[in-house]
Image (spheres, helix red, strand yellow):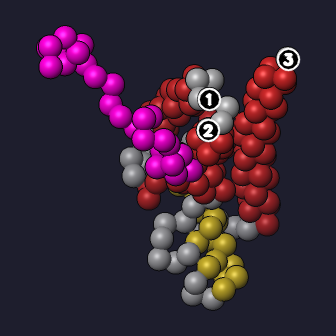
Amino acid sequence: MSHGASRRIGNSVFWMILLSTIAVDQLTKVIVQAKMAEHESIPLIPNIFHLTYVLNPGAAFGMLANKTVFFIAVTLVVVGGILYFYRRVPEDQIWMRLGLALQAGGAVGNLIDRIRTGLVIDFFDFRVWPVFNVADTAISIGVGLIMLSLLLAPDEEKKPVPSSESTGSGE
């Protein structure tokens, strides 16, 4: 019984992180849209960090601009893959589970923008990097946590599975 209870807690935390990421992302975007004009920039730390309201028609760095249907389809496949994979991640792989929740939440946050307007709302501006948002940050942190999880995995989990050809060779 305790094993089932701990699994439910793990799933609850996953969904809380995923949904919180979406909520914070969407709330910040609503605030930016309500308080700023497009292309307006507010220096918080002059020449270092500004809030700059831009509408991004593409992916990271504006790549593949105006391919909205493509991005919606890819995001649906990716989020479906994350949810499928998450269910197979052992409970003790906390960093992997957290990374997947952040990636899915970030992906859905930007997906909502694309479905609603065809554009993604960005506003964090470090002046030397393309403008980004909370969803982008969650996706990036999620990637980092997944990489950390893989680096921290015990050596036996990192070994490749032998192919059927090498197991029957009589070595």
- The residue that mark 2 highlights is 93
As measured in the structure, the alpha-carbon distance from the residue carrying label 1 to the one carrying label 3 is: 17 Å
Whether residue 37 appears in this view of the structure is yes
Residue 90's disc is 1
Q: Which residues are magenta?
A: 145-171
Element marked by disc 3: loop
- Image-based side of 25 in relation to 126, left or right: right
Residue at figure coordinates x 72%, y 47% from the top left: 21
Q: Earlier in the sequence, mark 2 or mark 3?
A: 3
> Where in the figure is residue 20, as x and y percent of width and height?
78, 45
Say if the magenta span includes residue 148: yes
- The residue that mark 3 highlights is 1
> Where in the figure is residue 35, as x and y percent of width and height?
79, 66
- 112 or 94: nearer the eye? 94
Residue at figure coordinates x 78%, y 22% from the top left: 3
In the image, farthest residue toward the bottom: 46
Element marked by disc 2: loop
Say if the magenta span includes residue 47: no
Identity of the amino acid at label 2?
Gln
As measured in the structure, the alpha-carbon distance from the residue carrying label 2 to the one carrying label 3 is: 20 Å
Q: Earlier in the sequence, mark 1 or mark 3?
A: 3
- Image-based side of 1 in relation to 166, left or right: right
Q: Are marks 1 and 2 in contact (CB under 8 Å)?
A: yes
